[in-house]
């Protein structure tokens, strides 16, 4: 956290609130008035105070207080990565706060994709929170097969994160396991690389094609066969290398 963000604590919050949520509310409110609206603040990466609100432990609990002090228009401002406050909430698994913003009709729904073409559902899959994923899919079912600039679908991200519960939910809601990314890989390729035989068979049962070739000519079937031939120790090393095959929204520039 930058020095600018460490300087000030919200005057509105009690000692107990500050102690419980120290990191989230140490936001740049230098020289903010003790009463009335806060002056508009945007940090060097384009985050405003609503972006920082998303990192509060339970943001829905301070929503009314925050709304009184901040501009509603700022809710829809995006940072340099193209992230809306809902991206941050999805990444943190804060589904209750997401519902609150939607229910109060404060969201411009044309803004819910970042500069890397990542949607709220991509972020939710990175969070590993099944409630957030279900909430987003119930509201925006068309996002289920959305691809980011690398061609990753939410299903692939859930597989790469080893989030089997999310994978199951997304498959059951109709995800296409045969969409290819820029490397020509499908969800079945990534599942085969991880040696997840149970999930591999499940994806096949939902239409996963084990004969699709990636850009190196490998099929899921050829990958899973080689995986079977490795020793347990070799498989552990291989999986450790593959655990984070795509960068999270936090890591991307």
Image: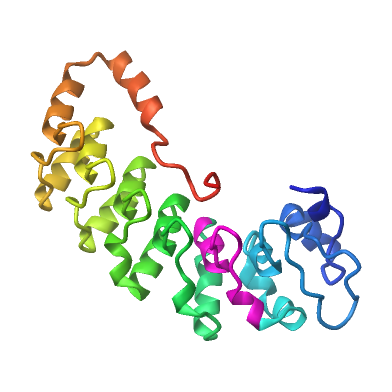
- Tell me what residue is drawn at x 27 percent, y 60 percent: 145
Name the image quarter holding residue 200.
Answer: top left
Question: Which residue appears farthest toward the bottom when viewing the image?
Answer: 105
The front one of 170 and 148 is 148
Splitting the image into 4 quarters, where does residue 67 fall?
bottom right
Residue 70: x %, y % from top left: 73, 78
Q: Is residue 86 magenta?
A: yes
Residue toward you, 191 or 41: 41
The quadrant in which residue 195 appears is: top left
How many numbered marks have been drawn onto this rendered protein structure? 0
Question: Is the image coloured rainbow, by chain, by secondary structure, or in one colour?
Answer: rainbow
Q: Could you tell me which residue is drawn at 77 percent across and 48 percent down?
A: 2
What segment carries the magenta color?
73-91
**Image: 179 above or below 185:** below
Residue at image x 29%, y 63%?
144
In depth, the one of 219 and 66 nearer the eye is 219
Q: Position of residue 93 (x, y in %)?
A: 51, 59
Say if the magenta span includes residue 117.
no
Q: In this view, does 240 lie to the left or right of 56?
A: left
Q: Position of residue 252 (x, y in %)?
A: 52, 46
Residue 28 image offset from top left, x and y in percent: 80, 61
Residue at 54% across, 63% down: 83
62 vs 227, left or right, is right
With 32 as the anchor, is 171 left or right in this view? left
Instruction: Give left or right: position of 11 versus 56.
Output: right
């Amino acid at each position: 956290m930058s020095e600018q963000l460490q300087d000030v604590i919200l005057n509105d919050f009690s000692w107990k609130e500050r102690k419980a949520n120290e990191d989230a509310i140490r936001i740049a409110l230098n020289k903010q008035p003790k009463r009335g609206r806060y002056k508009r603040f945007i940090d060097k990466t384009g985050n405003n105070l609503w972006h920082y609100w998303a990192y509060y432990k339970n943001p829905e609990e301070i929503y009314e207080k925050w709304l009184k002090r901040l501009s509603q228009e700022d809710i829809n401002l995006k940072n340099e990565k193209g992230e809306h406050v809902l991206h941050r909430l999805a990444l943190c698994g804060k589904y209750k706060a997401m519902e609150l913003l939607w229910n109060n009709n404060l969201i411009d729904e044309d803004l819910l994709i970042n500069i890397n073409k990542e949607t709220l559902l991509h972020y939710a899959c990175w969070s590993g929170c099944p409630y957030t994923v279900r909430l987003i899919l119930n509201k925006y079912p068309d996002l289920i097969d959305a691809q980011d600039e690398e061609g990753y679908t939410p299903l692939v991200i859930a597989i790469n994160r080893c989030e089997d519960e999310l994978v199951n939910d997304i498959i059951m809601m109709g995800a296409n396991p045969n969409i290819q990314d820029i490397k020509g890989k499908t969800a079945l390729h990534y599942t085969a690389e991880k040696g997840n035989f149970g999930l591999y068979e499940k994806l096949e049962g939902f239409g996963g094609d084990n004969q699709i070739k990636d850009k190196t000519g490998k099929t899921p079937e050829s990958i899973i066969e080689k995986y079977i031939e490795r020793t347990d120790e070799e498989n552990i090393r291989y999986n450790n290398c593959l655990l984070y095959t795509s960068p999270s929204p936090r890591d991307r520039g």
